[in-house]
């Protein structure tokens, strides 16, 4: 029997956390799929696949990749994959809390590039999100191989969660045909992947429907999309056959140019969304896809309702200050791009600030950078993405910048000043976006907020909506927070924050408890360099591994060396679901991809939780730092998401804290 309550709960949670579409597909709709590409390979007793989609903003799609697909401006990039992975992780945990097994599949999960055990395609994922989107009734599959939705066309990215829960199925899409073989994807493909080296078309049966789409050579399709090679490579364009050998040779000889903005996704537009309107930014071109109509008439005297709704939503999503102001003059974003080039007709800046505890930043080093400064950056990326999407839902264009002090100043967040010393140390050497003056002066320009000082990250969304500005006070007090004086109540408040952030284990140890352990460790490891790690010297994502040994400076350290005057150590942990571990090394299913996803996403979620706890402590007047290897006896393991702490990191600390 289907669980209607849980179905509605999942749908509500997913949509309220930033997704645009949700569907539920019974696994019976994969009855014709090869076993290794089926939900049963991921979870043997699976019954439903939950599929969620996020709409890629139209401003980015229309303006990104102009004039060439590898011309990518700062106004386009937003952390869509990171947000999708957070949704997948949280949905799997929600299903687990309700007593069901669940396995999330990473947003980008291709790892079987070559032919593999009878799978009838190259670049095969653990589970195709495109096929899952069709199975969940959210989309049809177009000739290009993209999933086309009736609401947003091909401008979506998807995430899938396989579960043992029997949820209420979404009917298969049965409306007007979304791909009419218009040929725009074929005509505009820069690598000729839809014209050259085509095999017999794929025919996929899903839920009683048959989808027929191009059997393209994925190496040709992916030479820029996956491998960052130059789309204009004369050598690759002239070749009749492009494969792994040719790709690796081009990497070795020419190196990377940069990622491609998918052309097929821009031009693949279903008939009912096509338009003949002149483009708002692409010379002599038409806007490819209709946007929803603007919510208010053009002659509306004020858009304060829109402004206040967006500002309130940004605060709910984590911003501490929101300021709205007119764009007074054009501003360079990255070399070759300005705001008005990325969004012609831009009128208004929506600036948002996230505060970073000073002690949190000052503790940031190369060894714990991912758990300190990377997390607020990711939060700002996702905040900008959600805000830009909300602006577009009102019918206006939106370009976002996850860090831009000049626009932040113009919006009234603060003023830029030159400092001789920075408190922001994301890499231990100074802020990454600071360019030192050529005259050698050791001064750096940073944004100073009257409330937050320079302990902030600023993100902005620029729009063509003529929003009313928010008032900017001449003087501001520092933020005040309710104080919790009772130690037991403070602990309870911290536990509540941890639980809200999906923490499974929570413990606190007094610093004194580590004194003997630290003395023993320093004696045992005296003279031993603990910071040595093996890295790939090759900076390309693909190609031959070139081993090199580097040192990240890790040593045996106690709490007082991380934070002078430290009194307590809070240890938090998140559990791996049993089904993830049980299926990881199974010979028949070979689910290494979903296990790898759970590894890196659990680490990220722990880091998000640690940031929330550190901010809460700072609000109470206490200093807090975050470290993923406090005592220094752990190491790191390599993953496709970077170096991750191994299982020994903070293990002794966990025992000491009783967690």
Image (spheres, grey):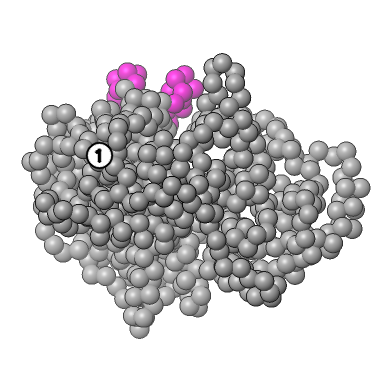
Write the residue at 26% across / 33% down. 340
> Which of the 4 image quarters holds residue 527?
top right
Query: Left or right: 147 with respect to 430?
Result: left
Q: Which of the image's four quarters has the C terminus?
A: bottom right
Residue 548 at x, y percent in the picture: 67, 30
Which residue is farthest bottom? 1
Identify the element where label 1 is drawn.
loop
Q: Is residue 201 magenta?
A: no
Badge 1 density bin: few <14, some 14–19, many ≥20, Cα 10 Å:
many
> Which of the 4 image quarters holds residue 606?
bottom right
- Whether residue 65 can be seen here: no
Answer above or below: position of 509 versus 212.
Answer: below
Which residue is farthest top? 439
Residue 338 at x, y percent in the picture: 32, 30
Write the residue at 49% across / 39% down. 447
Q: Main secondary structure of the magenta part?
A: helix
Q: Nearer the viewer, residue 7 or 612?
A: 612
Query: Left or right: 349 with respect to 365?
Result: left
Q: Nearer the viewer, residue 285 or 176?
A: 285
Residue designated by label 1: 346
Write the residue at 51% across / 34% down. 417
> Which of the 4 image quarters holds residue 362?
top right
Q: Which of the image's four quarters has the N terminus?
A: bottom left
Q: Is residue 248 magenta?
A: yes
Answer above or below: position of 228 versus 275.
Answer: above
Residue 532 at x, y percent in the picture: 74, 37
Which residue is farthest front? 474
Q: Nearer the viewer, residue 96 or 65?
A: 65
Q: Which residues are magenta?
A: 233-256
């Amino acid at each position: 029997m289907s669980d209607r309550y849980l179905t509605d709960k999942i749908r509500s949670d997913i949509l309220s956390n930033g997704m645009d579409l949700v569907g539920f597909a019974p696994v019976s709709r994969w009855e014709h799929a090869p076993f290794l590409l089926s939900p049963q390979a991921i979870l043997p007793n699976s019954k439903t696949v939950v599929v969620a989609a996020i709409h890629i903003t139209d401003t980015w799609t229309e303006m990104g990749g102009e004039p060439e697909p590898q011309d990518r401006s700062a106004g386009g990039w937003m952390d869509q994959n990171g947000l999708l992975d957070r949704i997948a992780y949280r949905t799997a945990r929600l299903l687990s809390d309700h007593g069901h097994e669940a396995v999330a599949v990473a947003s980008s999960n291709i790892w079987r590039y070559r032919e593999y055990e009878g799978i009838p395609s190259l670049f095969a994922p653990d589970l195709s999100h495109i096929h899952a989107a069709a199975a969940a009734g959210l989309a049809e599959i177009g000739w290009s191989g993209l999933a086309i939705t009736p609401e947003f066309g091909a401008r979506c990215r998807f995430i899938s969660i396989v579960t043992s829960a029997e949820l209420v199925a979404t009917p298969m899409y049965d409306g007007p045909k979304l791909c009419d073989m218009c040929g725009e994807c074929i005509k505009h493909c820069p690598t000729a992947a839809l014209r050259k080296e085509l095999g017999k078309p794929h025919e996929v049966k899903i839920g009683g429907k048959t989808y027929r789409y191009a059997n393209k050579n994925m190496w040709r399709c992916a030479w820029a999309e996956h491998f960052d090679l130059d789309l204009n490579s004369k050598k690759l364009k002239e070749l009749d056959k492009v494969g792994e050998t040719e790709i690796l040779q081009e990497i070795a000889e020419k190196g990377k140019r940069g990622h491609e903005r998918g052309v097929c996704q821009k031009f693949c537009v279903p008939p009912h969304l096509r338009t003949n309107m002149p483009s708002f930014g692409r010379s002599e071109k038409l806007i490819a896809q209709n946007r929803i109509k603007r919510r208010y008439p053009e002659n509306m005297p004020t858009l304060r309702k829109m402004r206040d709704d967006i500002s309130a939503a940004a605060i709910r999503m984590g911003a501490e200050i929101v300021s709205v102001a007119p764009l007074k003059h054009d501003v360079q974003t990255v070399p070759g791009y300005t705001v008005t080039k990325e969004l012609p007709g831009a009128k208004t800046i929506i600036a948002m600030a996230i505060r970073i505890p000073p002690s949190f930043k000052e503790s940031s080093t190369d060894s714990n950078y991912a758990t300190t400064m990377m997390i607020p950056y990711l939060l700002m990326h996702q905040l900008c993405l959600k805000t830009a999407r909300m602006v577009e839902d009102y019918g206006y264009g939106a370009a976002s910048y996850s860090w831009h002090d000049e626009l932040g100043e113009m919006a009234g967040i603060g003023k830029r000043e030159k400092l001789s010393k920075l408190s922001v140390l994301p890499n231990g050497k100074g802020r990454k976006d600071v360019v030192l003056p050529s005259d050698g002066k050791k001064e750096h320009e940073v944004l100073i907020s009257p409330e937050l000082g320079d302990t902030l990250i600023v993100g902005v969304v620029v729009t063509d909506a003529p929003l009313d500005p928010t008032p900017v006070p001449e003087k501001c007090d520092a933020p005040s927070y309710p104080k919790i004086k009772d130690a037991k109540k403070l602990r309870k408040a911290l536990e509540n924050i941890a639980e809200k952030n999906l923490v499974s284990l929570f413990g606190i140890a007094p610093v004194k408890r580590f004194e003997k352990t630290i003395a023993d460790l320093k004696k045992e490891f005296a003279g031993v360099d603990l910071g040595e790690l093996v890295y790939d010297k090759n900076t390309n994502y693909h190609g031959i591994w070139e081993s090199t040994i580097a040192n990240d400076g890790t040593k045996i350290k106690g709490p007082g060396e991380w934070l002078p005057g430290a009194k307590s150590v809070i240890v938090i942990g998140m559990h791996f679901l049993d089904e993830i571990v049980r299926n990881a090394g199974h010979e028949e299913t070979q689910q290494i991809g979903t296990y790898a996803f759970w590894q890196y996403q659990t680490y990220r979620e722990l880091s998000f939780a640690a940031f929330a706890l550190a901010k809460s402590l700072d609000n109470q007047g206490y200093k807090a730092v975050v470290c993923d290897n406090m005592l220094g006896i752990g190491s790191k393991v390599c993953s496709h998401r970077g170096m991750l702490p191994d299982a020994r990191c903070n293990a002794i600390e966990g025992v000491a804290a009783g967690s």
